[in-house]
Amino acid sequence: MPVQVFAEHPDGELFRDETKRIAEYVLSKEERIADIRVVYVDDKAIHELNKKYLHHDYVTDVISFPLGEDDGVIEGEIYVCVDQAKRQAEEYTVTHRQELSRLVIHGVLHIIGYDDTAPDERSSMKEKEDTYLEMIEAS
């Protein structure tokens, strides 16, 4: 289950090894095999992606693109906005690292099929994020 990390934002490079560990941990716990690319970007890049592909004209924290499944291997891309994660970390009074971890977990869950459009799905997904974040921080 290869996880590749690309840092288009300089802070993303600092989080490369941890990103791989987090994504692989979630995939392992979910018993899923995936080929995932995680890309750390800035406000401008995530805004452009959000506008072009999701038709939302604003900056967001994470965008996941499930790209399909072949022979049981899920493929996808996750774009994490480092700038938005910094703002959210301050707002939620968590560390920048914790917020980036949460966004990686959230992105991986989307890639493997979780959804958060309905309130009950959102609640379930948030519980999984919290559980995985606690487990990762404890390890």
Image: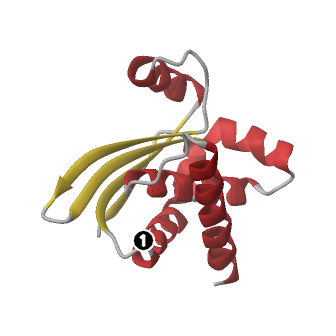
Q: What residue is shown at x 62% (from left), y 62% (from top)? A: 129
Front one among 47 and 64: 64
- Image quarter where the C terminus lies is bottom right
Element under disc 1: helix
Residue labelled with disc 1: 24
Q: What residue is shown at x 26% (from left), y 58% (from top)? A: 74
Q: Is residue 50 left or right of residue 135?
A: left
Front one among 66 and 36: 66
Q: Is residue 60 left or right of residue 72?
A: right
Please provide percent x and percent y for residue 51.
Answer: 47, 18
Occupied quadrant, residue 35? bottom left
Front one among 40 and 76: 76
Tell me: residue 10, above or below residue 49. below
Labels in figure, total? 1
Please provide percent x and percent y for residue 58.
Answer: 60, 20
Q: Give the residue type that dot 1 points to.
A: Glu
Please provide percent x and percent y for residue 45.
Answer: 50, 26
Q: What residue is shown at x 56% (from left), y 15% (from top)? A: 57
